[in-house]
Image: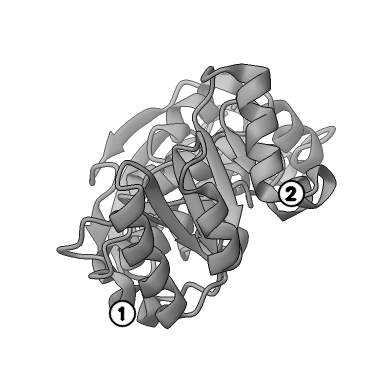
Amino acid sequence: MEDLLPLAFREDEGSGDVTSLATISEAARGVALLLCKQAGVVAGMPLAEKIFRFRGLEVNIRAKVSEGAQVQAGTVLMEMEGPLRGLLICERTLLNFMQRLSGIATVTRAFMEALAGSRTQLLDTRKTLPGFRHLDKYAVAVGGGVNHRMGLYDRVLVKDNHAEAAGSVRAAVDRIDSEYHGRYLVEAEVRSMKELQTLLDAKVDVILLDNMDDETLRRAIALTRARAPSIKLEASGNMDLQRLVRLRDFGLDFISVGALTHSVKALDISMDIKGAAHGG
């Protein structure tokens, strides 16, 4: 937020809200309602206070729902009382954040429900909006998902391009072990049963089964559980709600879904002024 808020206000408010300056007196105060116009999961409630404080505004915020609440269309999320000009200056910035985060939390909750009763955890990916990595992943957590690595720096993940550059996925994993000696959790991506078999005696913590059909996934899981039961298994690629329902009893440790953050449909939230005192 510290990085994003200066940018958000610079691009939206710019040199001043010329409409509010002309139509609303500086002394005018009022009450605004934050209204959720469709069913979903709410994320970003704590951001309102941060946004108003950044803008130097004293706004009395009365939350009507808790963070992560599942709400129906027509639910009032919060009441905000303060200077009218300030409320309107902050309106779009607040909505932009909350609509995006609530959209992520809503789709995450739907995917979590598809995995209900399963041992499998739902993971996000790095397919986030630039600058929003922490916020997007926060919204996934609000929706009930689990955060995968935050960036390139906090976990080793050998992907197909690393394997190609190193000669093979096994060669890449061996170089990782030689370089870091267990300093990082090590995950490696495989795209075939042949690649999987080369890793079952390697120093790898998680194997990512990428873009495998259901039958190949079953075979890969059975082979790994039999020969290397300590290795955890993650699946990714072409994951939608219907497929997660099929996969929830396969015995996977993780399923990662890029669509949680890369194809966000904003939740419909609006701000409506409901009471104004015209002063000055």
The amino acid sitting under disc 1 is Arg
Q: Is residue 204 left or right of residue 13?
A: left
Q: Could you say where residue 138 lies in the image, as x and y percent from the top left?
A: 44, 39
Give the residue displayed 68% in from the left and 46% down from the top. Answer: 23
> 245 above or below 228?
below
Q: Position of residue 71 (x, y in %)?
A: 25, 61
How many neighbours does mark 2 have within 10 angstroms: few (below 14), some (14-19), or many (20 or more)? some
* Side of 190 where 32 appears, left or right: left
Quarter the N terminus occupies: top right
- Compare residues 267 and 261 and report the one nearer the observer: 261
Q: Is residue 29 above or below residue 128?
A: above
Which circle marks residue 163 in the picture?
2
Q: What kind of element bears circle 1? A: helix
Is residue 64 in view from this perspective?
Answer: yes
**Residue identifier under label 1:** 246
Identified by mark 2, the residue type is Ala
Q: Is residue 211 left or right of residue 169?
A: left
Task: Please name the residue shown 49% across and 29% down the image.
Answer: 185
Tell me which label, 2 or 1, sits earlier in the chain: 2
Q: Tell me if 278 is positioned left or right of 21 in this view.
A: left
Closest to the observer, 146 or 10:
146
| Residue 66 picture quarter | top left
Dot 2 lies on which element?
A: helix
Tag 2–tag 1 contact (CB < 8 Å)? no
* Foreground residue among 92 and 251: 251
Measured along the vertical axis of the image, is residue 122 above or below residue 156?
below
Near mark 1 (Cα within 10 A), the count class, few <14, some 14-19 or many ≥20, is: few
